Amino acid sequence: MSLRTLVTDPGAFFAARRDDYSLAGPTAVVVAHALVALAGTVVVLRAVGDVVTAADAARVVYAAGEQRVSAPREIVLALWATGGLYFALWLAVAAVAYLVSLYFDGEGSFRRLLAFVGWTLVPTLVPAVLRAVVMGALFLGAPEFATEAALREWVRVKVVADPVYVAATATRPVFTLWMVYLWVVAAQYGRELSRRAAIAAVALPAALASVNAVGTLAVFAGRTLGLL
């Protein structure tokens, strides 16, 4: 079963993997999320690092390819935390679904459920990659910024108004809801549950993910209006 089947018939995708306990593919999906987040942030730091760190005393200078990038220690830590959050999400959703499924007498190992949940992060790679590509294209061609005010004005004109960037951010909740739906299917086939029991198994992380997606969209809309 290919990833295309995950899109067109997720039930068949997971059913075909009932005896497949390999975590290689799901791990690759989660690592891809982390790398996309890291790459996008490094590109932005290369363009604006000198501006955002001008008043920061605790700076970290590190190598990014042949470039030396300067950034506040807090930003560097947040950068790595972003990558770690995808692994935390993967483990947390699988753990919660497994524990709740015990109440419904679910069958199937935690390892299988963990593998299935890892595959469900495929949809959210789409807006993540699209946003990273747009940010990379915009910031790699950015001029040198003398002040934070100049940076904000450039972002207002070049980034906020970019239709692809806006589309990638605005459609993120749709892909998040798609991922949540796949959590239900993953729990259903990973733990041999009914659809109703599978929904209950992932209800808590699903609610949190949905609220976070809508909140992110609201924050983006607020910042966009503030910069316009």
Image (cartoon, rainbow, N blue to C red):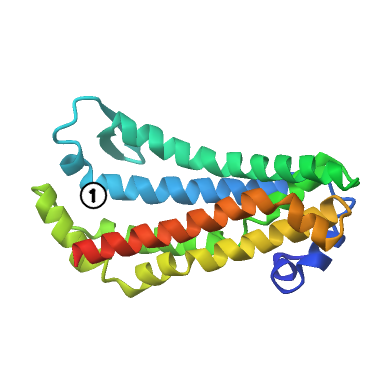
Residue 205: horizontal and vertical position, in percent?
A: 63, 49
Q: Residue at x 8, y 48 (%)?
A: 146
Three-letter code for the amino acid on which mark 1 is drawn: Ala
Q: Counting other residues with Cα less than 10 Å from the Cα at mark 1, is it few (<14), some (14-19), or many (20 or more)?
A: many
Quarter placement of the C terminus: bottom left
Q: Nearer the viewer, residue 115 or 2?
A: 115
List the residue tagged with mark 1: 47
Q: Is residue 68 left or right of residue 216?
A: left
Q: Is residue 202 left or right of residue 61?
A: right
158 shown above or below 115: below
Quarter placement of the N terminus: bottom right
Residue 78: horizontal and vertical position, in percent?
A: 39, 37
Q: Residue at x 20, y 41 (%)?
A: 52
Residue extending farthest top: 58
224 shown above or below 92: below
Q: Residue at x 32, y 40 (%)?
A: 66
